[in-house]
Every structure is written in C-alpha cells, then in structure tokens.
Amino acid sequence: MNTMKMSLEQYLALRRSLGFKLQSQESRLRNFVEYAQARGEQYITAKLAVEWAEHQCGPRTWSSRLSTVRSFARHLILTDPKTEIPPSGIFAPQRRPRPFIYSDDQIADPLKAMPLLHPGSFRGVTYHYFFGLLASTGMRFSEAARLLREDADMETGALTIRETKFGKSRYIPLHTSTWDALRRYCIERDLLPSRRASRFFFTGVHRRKSKAKPQPLSPLKAPRNCIIPRGSQAQSCCVHSRSPKVSILRQCRENQSW
C-alpha cells in the first residue's frame, strides 16, 4: 500500500509540473488510497474503483469520482501491470445545471445599486466597477480581485491576467466604454494617498483616511445583495432552484460594451 501512496505522490508532482492544480483531485485520490488500504488492496481494480466512487456520495458525483481514479490508473499501469483501468460509461456523466444568463437590464440593475450599498465608503464604488468589468470581459472573479495596477494599461486599454488556469497568462483588450469606465475609477480611487498606496487595481478602502493596509478585493467581502439587490429585477426573474452567481457573468458576454 505504501507503493500506491508513493505512486500517488509521483503522479501529483508530475501533473502539477505540467500546470494542473489538482485541488479536488488530490483530496479524492488520497481518500481513495485510504479506502483501498482499509480493505487491504494493493492494486487498483475496476471493482475497487467503482465501489469507492459510490461510497458515501450521491449519484451526481459518481462519474467524476471514477474519472479521477481512471486518470491515476492510466499513470500507474505504466509501471504496475497489475493495475486495472476502470471502464468509462458505467455511470451517467456529471452534468452541470443550466446556468442563469443575465440580460443587459439585469446586469445594469445591480450595477446602479452598488454605489448605494455602503454610504460613506469607497467599497460600493469599487463593486460597481469591479462587477462591471466581470460582465464586460468575462474575467474570473479571482482574476479581477488579484489584478495589480501594473497589469492594467490605461494607455492602450489592455489588461494582463497573470498565472491563470494551468499557470498561463493572457491579455484582454478592453472595449472603449470599459476602458473609459476604468479610467474614471482610477481617478476616483487615487484621490486619497491610502488608496494610492495599494498595489492592487481594485481596493475597498474607505473614502476617509485609513491606517489599514489596502488589500485586494476579497470574494468574502462581497455580500450577496451587491450582486443581486433585494427586490431587483434580476432577483425577481430568477426562477431557478439556485440563485444566480457571480461566476455566471463569465457566460453572459465577453469583451462587450460597459
């Protein structure tokens, strides 16, 4: 069993060297190895993988859990011929729920409300431009939150997104209206020295002088009602079992006008 554990460490190291983060996969595979160890199994078998995939989880995750083990088994069989690769097609593929797609009006509604959410604070203004940027470019929340001043070229209207998925970087050209909006934000943001001191493009520091060190905008500081204000058109139009999420803005439009 120590051999399987050692092989797992080698597999994770190899995949990460290729740019994969494997956050959920690592947790699953470690759980699988522990499951195999508790049953005295020294090799991956199709039966063992299927049993583990169904163990203590709902049917919606069975396919993806088995797929995680299948990838590991394909790596392991190169050095351990006793390994069995679990077949595909045993479980129905995992399907994501149909996303809620915001209309232009449903995006404009919360954007207008955001500056009013935190009276006397710069945070509401920051939310307005932050989520406007997500809606117009299709950026990920984390990419915009980590955006540095040096990554936003206000002379050419382009953003540099560093160390994204698979460790790659990319450039995003901005629509003229988005470019103009961000320049307005830069002017208002830099009115106070405390905000000018921040390395990050977006900051939630208050309008008044603050001794707090400016920090990147954190997803944990973004309240739900700054995305969908109560009583807004976007909230009333949501007929899905789950409320619309910020990440869905990526699917609404890309490189569009503000």
Image (cartoon, helix red, strand yellow):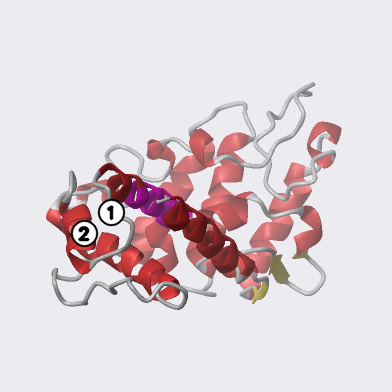
251 to 105, vertically: above or below: below
Distance from Cα at disc 2 to Cα at disc 1: 8 Å
244 or 51, which lies in front? 51
Q: Is residue 158 magenta?
A: no
**Relative side of 242 to 109, left or right:** left
Q: Is residue 27 magenta?
A: yes
Residue 247 in picture, x, y percent from top left: 41, 57
Residue under the image location 41 percent in, 53 percent down: 24
Residue 4 in picture, x, y percent from top left: 43, 57
The main secondary structure of the magenta stretch is helix
Other residues around mark 2 within 10 Å, as few (<14) / some (14–19) / many (≥20): some
Residue 253 in picture, x, y percent from top left: 43, 72
Segment tinted magenta in the rendering: 23-33
The secondary element bearing badge 2 is classed as helix
Asked whether residue 62 is in view, the answer is: no
On the image, which quarter does residue 227 sit in? Answer: top left
Disc 1 residue type? Glu
Residue under the image location 26 percent in, 64 percent down: 66
Asked whether residue 163 is in view, the answer is: yes
Labelled disc at residue 48: 2
12 to 241, vertically: above or below: below
Disc 2 residue type? Leu
The secondary element bearing badge 1 is classed as loop
Residue under the image location 69 percent in, 51 percent down: 185
**Relative side of 78 to 86, left or right:** right
On the image, which quarter does residue 63 sit in? Answer: bottom left
Asked if labels 1 and 2 touch by Cβ distance under 8 angstroms, the answer is yes
Residue under the image location 67 percent in, 47 percent down: 202
The residue where tag 1 is placed is: 41
Figure quadrant of the C terminus: bottom right
Of marks 2 and 1, which one's residue comes earlier in the chain? 1
Closer mark to the observer between disc 2 and disc 1: 1
